Amino acid sequence: MTNFSDDSIHRLSIHELSQLLQNKTVSASELVQSLIERIEKYNPVFHPFITTTFELALSQAKDSDARRFKARSLGPLDGIPVALKDAYDTKGVKTTVGSWLFRDRVPVEDCAVWERLAKAGAILMGKLECTEFCLGGPSKDAYFPMSLNPHDKSRYTGGSSSGAGVALATGMIPAAIGSDTGGSIRIPASFCGVAGIKPTYGLVSLRGLFPLSGSLDHAGPMARTSRDCAILLDEISGHDGRHPTSVNRSIAPTSPALSEHCEGLVIGLVTNFTDIDAVTDASRNACLRAMEVMTGLGAKIKRVELPDLWDYTIANTTIMSAEAYAVHQERFASSLEKISDLTRHRIALGAFLSATDYITAQKARRLLARKTFEIMNEQQVDVLCYPGMLSDPPEIDHVTRYYYLNSPLITAPANLTGAPCASLRVGYSDTNMPMSIQIMGRPFDDGTVLSVAHAYETVTPEFSKIVEI
């Protein structure tokens, strides 16, 4: 490796690494070996990986180098190390969904997302910790160690794609795939200080992703920059005839269309999300400062109001709880004592919901989605913006079984409507924890969402740095 060491290579983005690989400044084998050494050093400290696949990764890196030597590179992800949330099936590689019950589960087929990444030449470094069945956590009684927030180990990483947030923030990997049912990409992205997008519902196939709530689950990328998320999304999106929720509609590649300005765009600042009592002054002010930056990039800011955040939250939580219990009902009957405390109690909420409750929530979902996009059209805004999180991540010891029911869920609107929504870092709080905003667009306008995020990142590179450990 020429002039590169573990102290520099792990800081680079997918975009930067791809250029180095194409220029033969670094080989995939050298890159993978460097990251293996970093994972071996820091995984015992922060626990983002449940399973590592180093032997496989080195073999895939050798194949990638051979293709590049013959000028047959498969594209920008050829030779790029990737890790998957451990809810995604990988043929011959253990997939546990963070549970003791699945501790020895080895799938016989790959998930759709990894099929596409492998075809693009990506290299599998391993499987990342996720809260049990994508709902429990942070659970001290879980079978696998919880991943720890590198900004402050006493604070929650956010879930359920927690390992992905930690692995990215600590420079163990440049690319990850998470999933998002009520914010499980955007919450750890915000709390760990990385980038992530929940794509339009159905744009990325859910085949081979263990379900939490099938009508709300989204598969999507996490990385250290929005440009990197766009590169990943371009590879993993597309119709999959083998899964019923996959939409038979494509979008233009997002990464080539990214812009470094926001000229002509109108951003709707959602005032009734920004001004609710649950939002801290630090989070609110960070959002307002971000709007000043967007204005400097050429955007027009318009103040808008959406339906009450609690309306989105209640509908999303009702649907998620009912569908999660349906997935696990038989498992509860036979193995309840083997499921961690937080997971057991959160999934059990679904047992107390009636068919009427579920249908009412689905009706509310349709009404809220229609109203949301009507407001965007009436106000002529291209994207919406509101705080990424209400506040700093809570201390782990303060996360109770139902803590998420105490405040409205600011990530819920995008899940409920199926709209694309990115988490974008916008600074640090007084406690030196990362802060974020969310950029939400119309369905299938994922490119505009990522372009706005990328434009902001070009003038605030200080927020895209990894954690110094």
Image (cartoon, rainbow, N blue to C red):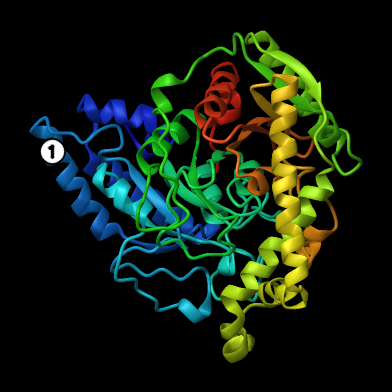
Q: Secondary structure at mark 1?
A: helix
In the rendered structure, the answer to whether residue 383 lies left or right of residue 133 reads right
Q: Position of residue 164 (x, y in %)?
A: 51, 51
Question: Where, by quadrant of the figure, is residue 127 drawn?
Answer: bottom left
Mark 1 nearby-residue class (10 Å; few <14, some 14–19, many ≥20): some
* Residue to which mark 1 is pinned: 67
Q: Residue at x 54, y 24 (%)?
A: 448
Asked whether residue 376 appears in the rendered view, the answer is yes
Q: Nearer the viewer, residue 49 or 110?
A: 110
Q: Is residue 7 above or below residue 243?
A: above
Question: Where, by quadrant of the figure, is residue 297 drawn?
Answer: top right
Q: Residue at x 50, y 36 (%)?
A: 224
Question: Where, by quadrant of the figure, is residue 320 drawn?
Answer: bottom right
Q: Position of residue 329 (x, y in %)?
A: 61, 81
> Which image quarter holds the N terminus?
top left
Q: Is residue 192 above or below residue 73?
A: below
Q: Position of residue 466 (x, y in %)?
A: 53, 36
Q: Amino acid at mark 1?
A: Arg
Q: Is residue 444 above or below residue 295?
A: below
